[in-house]
Amino acid sequence: MKFIHTADIHWGMNPDSDKTWSRDRAQAIRDTFAEVIRQAKARDIDCLFIAGDLFHRQPLLRDLKELNYLFSTIPGVRVVIIAGNHDRIRSNSAMMSFDWCPNVTWLMDEELSSVYFEDLNTEVHGFSYHTAEITESRLNNVQAPDSPHIHVLLAHGGDAAHLPLDKKLLASSGFSYVALGHIHKPELAPDLSYAYPGSLEPLDKTETGQHGIIVGEISPVSRQVTSLKFVPLAQVQYVPLVVHVTPATTSGELTDRITEVIQKRGLQHIYRFRIRGMRDPDIVFDLESLSHRLQVTEIIDESEPQYDFSQLFADHPSDMIGFYIRALQKENMSPVEKKALYYGIDALLRTTDERS
């Protein structure tokens, strides 16, 4: 039995809503999910498992129609879906009365239920969220039924507020495979008994690395996973980078270096930069133009001005500058203490310059 496992699509979300590229990110979610459907057809899979948060919020009727059309293009693929905390089942949800195409099964119950596909000898189990949180470890004692079927479990959770899970217990629960959702970083069990595919597209700057789907196969004889791999599909990555500066680095030079790095790595990606090293105290890095021209979500300046505190103290032994250095400077200073020293000295020197 061949399958694709995905989760956390968050259809309807606008990542980076305060950025100029937000609409492109929303479209990328839809386009990449359409690619999942194409992959299902091209790989001739039997089942598509969606382990929660297909939608970012309660879907509109037009969203259901769009997805139903996509599912209708793979009529030979059994699509099994559970709702996560974002798209949880509500009494007034349009999902409750929507007429899905015949190959789609929603396991909407709040308690564990299942659907059996006789031609695949496969039974798929799962339950949907009906509340924003599930704090009980509801699956820690669950066991696959004692029957000669392939048993697959769909579950959405993995943190304290959303279905806490004991992965060791899941691995020994007797299910052929446990398809997990909610955690947005891909993870495959060492014994291939469970996996998180992660979010289909990265949804914010913390979701670095590659994103995509899980493709697997379960033997009809052993009823064990024989193949399981992560397949990257996302159009974009959030890329964190560190740029080092020296006292000779100017604002223009730094802008050129960052631009060159982005052009080499790919203009389609979204970047977060940290600036580290020592800089000339007279230099202020003005990089705002980068965020307007390129997809730069954040620039954190952790560089430190290269003050000669010994010389400064010698030049100001009895005024406020000397007193400030004596009061704050010490060995093994924390980053906060260093910033307090640097910012204070900078302010005092500027005040001195203005008075002179």
Image (spheres, helix red, strand yellow):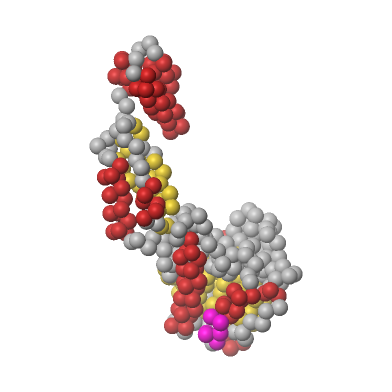
Q: Which residues are magenta?
A: 69-75
Of residues 159 and 208, the one nearer the viewer is 208
- As drawn, the residue found furthest toward the right would be 91
Q: Is residue 173 left or right of residue 200?
A: right
Q: Is residue 171 visible in the rendered structure shown here?
A: no
Residue at 46 percent across and 68 percent down: it is 28
Q: Report x, y in % for residue 134.
A: 68, 59
Q: Report x, y in % for residue 249.
A: 27, 40
Q: Report x, y in % for residue 158.
A: 59, 58
Q: Is residue 319 visible in the rendered structure shown here?
A: yes
- Is 3 drawn above or below residue 88 in the view shown? below
Q: Would you identify the image quadrant in which residue 234 lies?
A: bottom left
- As drawn, the residue found furthest toward the top would be 318
Q: Is residue 204 left or right of residue 172?
A: left
Q: Would you identify the image quadrant in which residue 250 lies?
A: top left
Q: Report x, y in % for residue 95.
A: 67, 74
Of residues 66 and 35, the one nearer the viewer is 66
Residue at 68 percent across and 74 percent down: it is 94
Q: Is residue 294 left or right of residue 172?
A: left
- Assess whether residue 173 is covered by the magenta stretch: no
Of residues 71 and 259, the one nearer the viewer is 259
Quadrant where the C terminus sits is: top left
- Is 116 drawn above or below residue 82 in the view shown? below
Of residues 10 and 297, the one nearer the viewer is 297
Q: How many marks?
A: 0
Residue at 28 percent across and 54 percent down: it is 260
- As drawn, the residue found furthest toward the front would be 355
